[in-house]
Structures are given as structure tokens and as C-alpha cells.
Image (cartoon, rainbow, N blue to C red):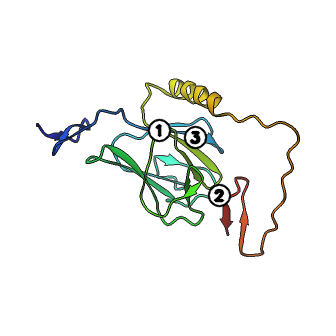
Amino acid sequence: MGSYDSETGTGWYGEQKVGDTAMASLIVTSGKREGDYYPLGRRTNVIGRDEALLIQVLDNMVSRKHLQIRFDEKTGRYYAFDMKSRNGVYVNNQRIEDETPLADGDVILVGLTTLLFLDQDFKDKDSALLHYRKVGERMRVTVYGPQEIEPKPLAPGGTGQGETGHPIRW
């Protein structure tokens, strides 16, 4: 059986082998920091607008401490948690209310910034971006013909709808 080594993130926890997968990472796919790459490690990561955070998102629709992504040693998975942000956290276009497990390729929306969760680590930023470009080619949707977007009226002091179609409160 052996034991779990929290330094390397590998070993056995009870009867379950943990640490077979590489560490996860995030790539900013839209927003002011598009193209930024963040290896997550096996620690808890807080994402937001605060300057003191390792993963800072420069977006006025993002709270100072907006989202938490943590690694669970028991399950060997990463989980996303909305830290009571004003505009919410969306995983694959679904607003999350509770701690939500993440899977490879999940798209996380915070404010008007999109993050791609990858269940793997890369040796450097360039190899991460190369992987993202290859995945992006497979995910691209082709739309033919002109597209009309119906403007949504904004209620004064209430809520509106952002570019992504998600509700925005101010």
C-alpha cells in the first residue's frame, strides 16, 4: 500500500492510487491577459483582481478574490469554487453554486475573461500555447452568413447582459 507523499503529489491514499495524472494548468483564452499560462500545482489557487494573487485577472467584472481552484489529494481531482463573487463563475456556460469538479478542456468564465482548464502541465508557456492552438482548431465553430445580435436593454442600477450573454450586476 505505501503512503501519500504530499510533496510530490503521488502515492497511495487508503486503497486509491493518487497522482497518476500530471499537474493541471490554466490558459487565459480571452481578456486582457489572453495567452497567459498558469501551472496550478497541487495547492489551492485563488484567482481574482487582487494584486497579491498569483493568478491575477485584469477585468473590472472580476472580484478581488473571485474563484478558488483546489486539488483534492483524496480524489486526485481539481475543484472550482465561487468565492461569493458578484458576477459568478461559469464552468462550460453553467453557473456554479457549489464546489464543482473540473475536467480537461473545461472553459471557466470569470467576468468577461475566459480560462481554459487543462488536466496537464507543460514544460513552458510556449508548449502550453501550442497545445491551446491545436485544441482551439478542433473546437472552432464555423458560422455562415451574417449574424444579427439583438441588443438587450439595461435596467438602471440593476442587471444587464455582458458580451458573453451572462448576467452582469453592478
User: Which mark is drawn over residue 126?
Assistant: none
Tell me the mark number nearer the camera, choosing from 2 and 3. Answer: 3
Residue located farthest toward the front when viewing the structure as drawn = 144
Quarter in which the C terminus is drawn? bottom right
Q: Which residue carries the number 1 mark?
A: 104
Q: Where's residue 15, x and y in %?
A: 16, 43
Q: Where's residue 139, x and y in %?
A: 63, 34
Q: Residues within 10 Å of mark 3 (few under 14, many from 20)?
A: many
Tell me the mark number nearer the camera, choosing from 1 and 3. Answer: 1
Q: Amino acid at mark 2?
A: Asn
Vertical relation: 57 (above or below) 153: above
Asked if residue 65 lies left or right of residue 13, the reply is right
Q: Confirm or deny contact between disc 1 and disc 3 (CB under 8 A).
A: no
Quarter in which the N terminus is drawn? top left
Determine the CA span between mark 2 and mark 3.
Answer: 16 Å
> Secondary structure under badge 1?
loop
Q: Amino acid at mark 1?
A: Asp
Which residue is at a point 58% across and 66% down the rendered structure image?
86
Which residue is at a point 49% across and 46% down the rendered structure image?
55
Q: Which residue carries the number 2 mark?
A: 60
Asked if residue 154 lies left or right of residue 24, the reply is right
Camera-side residue: 58 or 129? 129
Which residue is at a point 85% across and 45% down the rendered structure image?
147
Asked if residue 135 lies left or right of residue 16, the reply is right
> Secondary structure under badge 3?
strand
Q: Which residue carries the number 3 mark?
A: 28
Count of numbered circles on the image: 3
Q: Amino acid at mark 3?
A: Val
Q: Where's residue 111, x and y in %?
A: 62, 56
Dot 1 or dot 3: first in sequence order is: 3
